[in-house]
Amino acid sequence: MNNQKVMLNPITEQQFDRVAMATERGQLKQKNDEFGVSFSIWFNGHIVMSSNVDVNGQRHYWSHL
């Protein structure tokens, strides 16, 4: 079992979009969450970036690297 802690670092919308536009089929995933649609970017089976909406309707962008 891997016990590494994932560090979430805030990134800009532009940084997220730049990577999202370069993804291949199946690497950009979408999910309906409690407060809106969340997105995640996956490479080699690992999440590398995500975007979610908080309770106030604000979208946040994160790097998981």
Image (cartoon, rainbow, N blue to C red):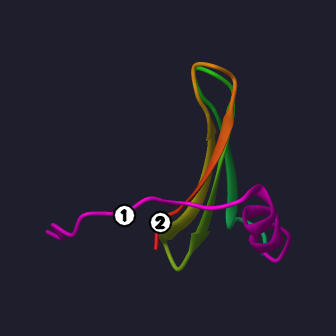
Asked whether disc 2 touches disc 1, contact meaning CB atoms under 8 Å apart, the reply is yes
Q: CA distance from mark 2 to mark 1?
A: 6 Å
Task: Give me the residue at 57% from left, 19% from top.
Answer: 55
Q: Nearer the viewer, residue 54 or 45?
A: 54
Total numbered labels placed on residues in the image? 2
Label 2 element class: loop
The residue wearing badge 1 is 7
Q: Residues within 10 Å of mark 1 (few under 14, many from 20)?
A: few
Identify which residue is drawn at 78% across, 69% down.
25
Please tell me which of labels 2 and 1 falls first in the chain. 1
Q: Residue at x 14, y 68 (%)?
A: 1
The boundaries of the magenta stretch are 1-23
**Residue at the spot 33% in from the left edge and 63% down from the top edge:** 6
Residue 46, image x and y in percent?
Answer: 47, 71
Q: Is residue 10 above or below residue 18?
A: above
Image location (x, y in percent) of residue 47: 50, 65
Residue 35 picture quarter: top right
Q: Amino acid at mark 1?
A: Met
